Amino acid sequence: MYLELFKLHELPFRLSPDPQFLYLSKQHARAKAYMESTIWFTDGFVVITGEIGAGKTTLIETFLRELTADVVVAQINQTQLSPTAFLQTVLVQFGFSPFEMKKPEVLATLNQFLTEQHVNGRKVLLIIDEAQNLTYRVLEEIRMLSGIETTKEKVLRIILAGQPELNDKLNSKELVQLTQRVRLRFHLSALSAPDTSSYIDHRLEVAGSQGRRIFAENTYNVIFKYTGGVPRLVNTLCDTSMMAAFGRDSEIVAMEDLQSAIRELQWVEFASRTNRMQQLPAIGTAPHAETGHAVGRILLASGGKTILERELRPGRIVIGRTQDNDLQIDSKFISRHHCQIVTQIDSCLIEDLNSTNGIYVKSKRVRRHNLNDGDVVVVGQHEIMYIDERTPRVRGIADAIEEAGRS
């Protein structure tokens, strides 16, 4: 590998979470402080969310490494479990073998264990990573566990960590009681451009650079432009760029090495990607291409009034609650990334992106729907009307929206 060339003693941009390499930006430091607060306060959940690759797992590993001996920890990473299997998994983390136990026995054992730990002066912490995959039934079991208490305080501390969809679940009406017990909630966003540069230098320093500049000065802004400050993406691009420089036998990663890595990875600029941080496959032309005529357009309406109009050209637009969408609908009934519209020369498709409240056509919830001229799709408390520019108008817009509201 390139360690000898760059005079490093270990790989600086590995993807595996390593607390030694943690860069504590202001955001990461705050999230870590929220985790640490669970040791001193037992009056509610702490919820930490962040996009894929934002550094949640590394943060958790660092937090766990610093815990004192009087803290007993159960860490759950596999979250696609039934309620009973989840409770059994928690017991396994505490050293039991509960697989022959029925649910009442599992609950009784957990209750007794938590009470004994409290009596013996130990704190019990349950950390659940990838919590967005938990079912509503399992989340309800967790809420019930959080209610185990002595006469003075609750005996189980709980941290839920996951992708932004976890917030959508917690905001749903099915989990009102659990949400009321959330004491702190924090979203771990991507690094800023200055933090991205400091992050790169920090990891190189930990790996043994001893202050030597390995990446050329003009590469830092480009790295941010293509990674959006997402730590995992920064690691991938920097590692691939160092391999390109190694191929040239160069001790400095120059712009040509960075561009070579971008081509190899087939990346586009981060602003052109969706929230899932992956390059979207090309469908026709790029989503924001201005070539050619509009194939159709959509009208966004609320309360029977049109509030926005958007042309559709071949490509894809993502619709959701947050600003990183192509079309933002700021409403609590809309998921962070709710649905997408894929437009081709001869067709247009709307597809649900695993949203909480779904999309509806003629009062029927659909996973995906091929749009026809005049179709109205209900999204939360909004309506999206599709107008095919290749089809003559046959009815009024207001009439169609009013009809959708009655259906």
Image (spheres, grey):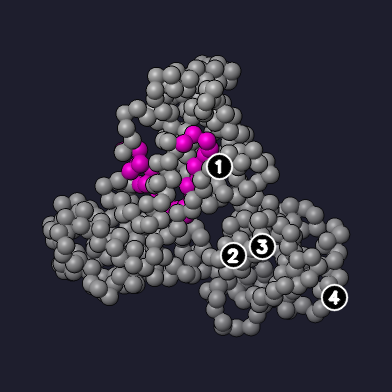
As rendered, which of 346 and 211 lies closer to the eye?
A: 211
Which residue position holds label 4? 396
Q: Secondary structure at mark 4?
A: loop
Q: Position of residue 225 (x, y in %)?
A: 39, 70
Q: Earlier in the sequence, mark 2 or mark 3?
A: 2
Q: Which residues are magenta?
A: 41-65
Q: In the picture, residue 232 is in which quadrant?
A: bottom left
Q: Earlier in the sequence, mark 2 or mark 4?
A: 2
Please say if 58 is above or below 392. above
Q: Earlier in the sequence, mark 3 or mark 4?
A: 3
Picture disc at residue 182:
1
Q: Estimate the spatial distance between the alpha carbons at disc 2 and disc 1, rounded to whole Å.
A: 30 Å
Picture disc at residue 318:
2
Q: Amino acid at mark 3?
A: Ile
Residue at left 72%, top 69%? 300
Q: Amino acid at mark 4?
A: Gly
- For residue 335, say whether it is visible: yes
Which residue position holds label 3? 350
* Label 1 crowd (10 A; few <14 / some 14-19 / many >=20): some
Q: Earlier in the sequence, mark 3 or mark 1?
A: 1
Q: Earlier in the sequence, mark 2 or mark 1?
A: 1
Q: Are circles 2 and 1 on residues that touch, CB within 8 Å?
A: no
Q: Earlier in the sequence, mark 4 or mark 1?
A: 1
Q: Position of residue 372 (x, y in %)?
A: 75, 68
Residue at left 23%, top 72%? 216
Q: Position of residue 345 (x, y in %)?
A: 63, 75
Quick check: 209 left or right of 398?
left
Q: Estimate the spatial distance between the alpha carbons at disc 3 and disc 4, rounded to whole Å.
A: 22 Å
Q: Secondary structure at mark 2?
A: strand
